[in-house]
Amino acid sequence: MTLYGIGLGPGQPDLVTVRGKRALESADVVYSPGRLSRSVATEHVPEERIGDLDFPMTRDEEKLRTAWKEAAAEIAPTARDGDAAFVTLGDPNVYSTFGHLRRTLAAFHPEVDLEVVPGVSAMSAFATALGVEITAGSSLALREADRGASPTGPDRMILFKVTDAPATHEGLVEAGYDVVYGRRLFMEQGETVVTDDPSEIDERDYYTLAYAEKPETRVEQATDAFLEAADESGVVTDGGENGSGAVVRQERSEAALCGDEVKHD
Ligand SMILES: C[S@@+](CC[C@H](N)C(=O)[O-])C[C@H]1O[C@@H](n2cnc3c(N)ncnc32)[C@H](O)[C@@H]1O
């Protein structure tokens, strides 16, 4: 029947989508490639329906191909006779192990039907966790920054796999970026850390990302006019022009919410 590739989101079980939860509940076997994805899946399905898959911690391509062939050979019969699920953290199509499985099944078990259930990716969850707004009109690049790498170029970047924050930080600051780090965002296991100080994050943890932005690149928004007109209390009024003097819009500025001073004309 079908193999569902299900994105579990960043780690907290209630960030699994409704569709993902339904697919998990209806699968005969839910295959998990790791401990963290397993712990999220077991919040939605009983342990006895979880199928653990073993992958070697290696960059040896031959060993990886062997492991994926074995995983596909185990999953294919379940997906042929019923419904199976393969879970990944985040989204299955963003820097994910699911791609290896999809390619291996296409090569060796083309009769298996696939359906992907998207998940909340760290690529989008970071914005809320770090208090960042990617405004209309701005561009954003996704890069990897493992083992101290400092990719530079675009005005705004999300960096995955930040395993050596101090080294990555040095190169980014030199290139003119402001950087914020986020470790284990929306995750239940381990401590969540959000900081602009790389020394707070120097202990290596694979589930760490960074957001880097050139400070001068903010794109003006139509509603910025409200902030410019805000009075001392951060409240915008119509100044009596509509006859009532009533507050026509009450909007605390983002700057005030972040603890920064609000500018007034
Ligand atoms: C192989 S990628 C998997 C991405 C995943 N498929 C997704 O869509 O979020 C792993 C990298 O994503 C980032 N990441 C994933 N989940 C995260 C989380 N909850 N908090 C912080 N970073 C996370 C980290 O940079 C980590 O090294």
Image (cartoon, rainbow, N blue to C red):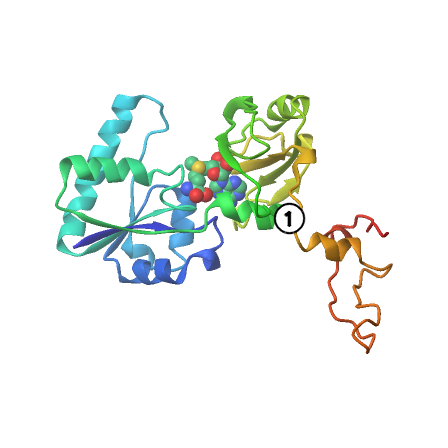
Q: Position of residue 230 (x, y in %)?
A: 80, 58
User: As drawn, is 195 to the left or to the right of 62?
Assistant: right
Label 1 SS: loop
At x 33%, y 30%, the residue is: 56
The image shows residue 202, relative to residue 34, as above or below, that is: above
Q: Position of residue 241 (x, y in %)?
A: 81, 71
Q: Quadrant of the N terminus?
A: bottom left
User: As drawn, is 125 to the left or to the right of 83?
Assistant: right
Q: Position of residue 42 (x, y in %)?
A: 38, 55
User: As drawn, is 154 to the left or to the right of 6?
Assistant: right
Residue 253 in sight: no
Q: Which residue is mark 1?
A: 131
Q: Quadrant of residue 162?
A: top right
User: Which sits in the foreground, 80 or 238?
Assistant: 238
At x 65%, y 32%, the residue is: 214
Please name the amino acid that badge 1 sits on. Answer: Gly
Query: Alpha-carbon neighbours of circle 1 within 10 Å: few (<14), some, or many (≥20)?
Result: few
At x 61%, y 48%, the residue is: 133
